[in-house]
Amino acid sequence: MNTEPLILCESLVKIYRLNQEGGGSVEVQALQGMDMTVSEGEMLGIVGASGSGKSTLLNVLGGLDHPTGGRALIAKQDLGQLSPAALDLFRRKTVGFVWQQGARNLISYLTALENIELPLTLSGQVGRAADQRALELLDLVGLSERKNHRLEELSGGEQQRVAIAIALANRPRLLLADEPTGELDTATAQTIYDLLRRLNKQLGLTIVIVSHDPGIARHVDRVVAVRDGKLASETLRVQKVDSDEHHLVELAVVDAAGRLQIPREYLEQFNIRRRVQVELTEEGILIRPPEREHHSHDQTSALSPNEQESTAFETKVAPSRLWKVWQSLKSRFTRPAQNHNGDEK
Ligand code: ADP
Ligand code: MG
């Protein structure tokens, strides 16, 4: 695998502005500073909850949507800076797209072959050359024997193969697939993943697949998880020592500013809300809930009104070196607070 990045996203931001009835507008931050690198020849999976920004990312990478901020470089071209003509060329020459409903852009009463010839003809290839290329593409996706079947006679998986053949017609360097198996059963999905893997190896094609299926990790080199428009974690396949077997390792991602997303279930397990204590230990960095006595005046908003009042008072009258004395005095005169387990309720 070539190590030169084909895709480089730096602090990529995409904001949609929606006009509301009666004036005014709301903003949706679909991408909130996404950093991502994909090597040439890599096969990458993107997973994440619905609405996390996966399709937006793919649309920006495919030149279908303009980034609001940050940079998206593909094959060294900064998509945000391309002229409309250059962007059009980029879409036609550099990327191919496959959608969830592969057959959406296909014509049901034309044969598989005719469906592939049609876009070739529209892009200027005619006659025998177009014929030849269409046959080649059908062969590439393993559908030669079905060439004369009308689209409506093909299964969902076969229709998706036709869509993949069309996406490859212009020999793109990058194939972007948005939930290509979303409407297929598991067994058929498997055959599509296998096909994409073969194309990846055979053509050296870089492939980015968005998927709902966490099991996609088995089919790709690397999976990145997107949360709230940012990269949250990466899952890598690591080869076991002295064996051909692989196991999967999930790693949290540190962004360019040193920020880290911690899995939500970990935060919940330790009842971590807004702040944590970060400590250096010999083995690494320990992140844990703040200790009660380390609370200071600027977290009063996380407390109930009663607690806020007493904390504000404590901050005024009790300098930190007297904190423990004050605490022991206070505990003699007041009932224990409801939350004494060190959390920030
Ligand atoms: P995913 O593919 O992960 O489900 P999307 O990228 O489609 O997520 O959407 C991310 C967020 O951006 C969502 O809140 C979605 O509603 C919003 N969004 C996506 N496309 C548009 C658009 N064209 N106009 C306005 N908001 C959009
Ligand atoms: Mg989507």
Image (cartoon, grey):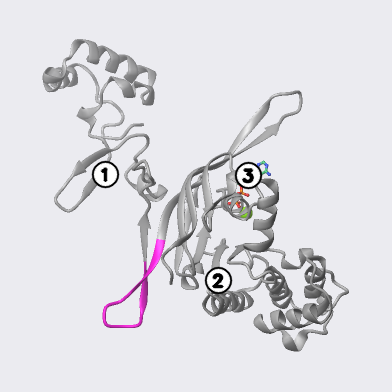
Figure check: 176 above or below 70: below
Quick one: SS at disc 2?
Answer: loop
Earlier residue among tags 3 and 2 = 3
Mark 3: amino acid: His
284 magenta-colored:
no
**Where residue 260 appears, x then y in whole percent?**
36, 45
x and y, in percent, of residue 23 in the image: 73, 23
The mark closer to the camera, 1 or 3, is: 3
Q: Are marks 3 and 2 in contact (CB under 8 Å)?
A: no
Q: Earlier in the sequence, mark 2 or mark 1?
A: 2
Q: Nearer the viewer, residue 36 or 313?
A: 36
Rate crowding at label 1 as few (under 14), some (14 to 19) or many (20 or more) other CA atoms within 10 Å: some
Task: Tell me: is circle 1 under 8 Å from ligand 1.
Answer: no
Task: Write down the residue under mark 3.
Answer: 66
Q: Residue at x 83, y 76 (%)?
A: 114
Q: Could you tell which of marks 1 and 3 lies nearer the N-terminus?
A: 3
Left or right: residue 252 versus residue 168 is left
Which of 55 and 39 lies nearest the eye of the viewer?
39
Give residue 99's quadrant in the image: bottom right
Name the residue beneath numbered marker 1.
287
Question: How many residues crowd around disc 3 within 10 Å: few (fewer than 14), some, or many (20 or more)?
Answer: some
Magenta-colored stretch includes residue 238: yes
Instruction: Identify the residue position indicated by label 2 in the image.
Output: 205
Magenta residues, start to end: 235-248
Q: CA distance from mark 2 to mark 1?
A: 40 Å
Say which residue appears at 36% left-offset and 41% top-offset. Answer: 257
